[in-house]
Amino acid sequence: MVTIALGSKNPVKISATKEALEILRLNWDLIATDIDSGVDKQPFCDQTYVGARNRALNAIKATNADIGLGIEGGVCNVYGKFIANAVVYVITKEGVENFAISSSFTLPSSIVSLILQGKELGEASDIIFKTINSKTKEGAVGLLTNNIIDRKTLYVQPIILALYPIYNTIINNTLF
């Protein structure tokens, strides 16, 4: 049995990982563990990749799992617009690494202003939308899209895309 360690106990990240594994028809054991990303509370641009990789790597070390999976949300200024997205990073205990990126979405100036004042995206969204702890539920994307796309939905595809070289190797005995 393959064991995958998720570097977070956030219920949305756990649920998205479970759904991705179900879609892939992988009966792998999932362990969720609190792992610090090692980057700022609100990562910007490349720090999002670093945080996701740190979570994946340290999840393996903390649990001795076969695969570590890290999910890190971040924001970046692209052509004068602030976008948000997530990076999903996977690492096997043999050292195979891969990552994928979620869809990105632009952030309204009211949220950007709070982020630039030091708030993380979830906190800023909660202030603007008068919600509590949305990062463990629908997330900013859910609040902005009226839950047409929520945080869990945003994460499922990049989890599958980050895992494909690993599950193809295990299932089909092909190399990445």
Image (cartoon, rainbow, N blue to C red):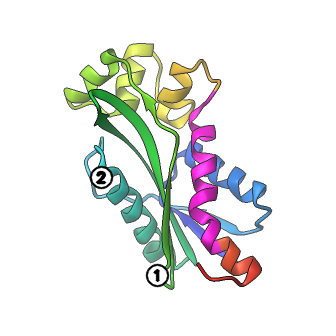
Q: Which quarter of the rendered picture does the N terminus lie within? A: bottom right
**Is disc 1 surrounded by few (<14), some (14 to 19) or many (20+) residues within 10 Å?**
few
Q: Residue at x 75, y 60 (%)?
A: 24
Q: Residue at x 62, y 23 (%)?
A: 147
Q: Residue at x 46, y 81 (%)?
A: 95
Q: Is residue 150 visible?
A: yes
**Is disc 2 surrounded by few (<14), some (14 to 19) or many (20+) residues within 10 Å?**
few
**Tag 1: residue type?**
Gly
Q: For mark 2, give the secondary structure.
A: helix
Q: Is residue 1 visible?
A: no
Point out residue 52 in the picture as x, y percentages from the top left corner: 41, 57
Q: Is residue 34 left or right of residue 48?
A: right
Question: Which numbered circle lies on residue 95?
Answer: 1
Q: Residue 33 versus residue 97: which sits nearer the camera?
A: 97
**Tag 2: residue type?**
Asp
Q: Is residue 15 left or right of residue 142?
A: right
Q: For mark 1, give the secondary structure.
A: loop
Question: Which numbered circle lies on residue 46?
Answer: 2
Tell me, yes or no, whether the highlighted magenta stretch contains residue 27. no
Tell me, yes or no, whether the highlighted magenta stretch contains residue 161. yes
Q: Residue at x 63, y 49 (%)?
A: 157
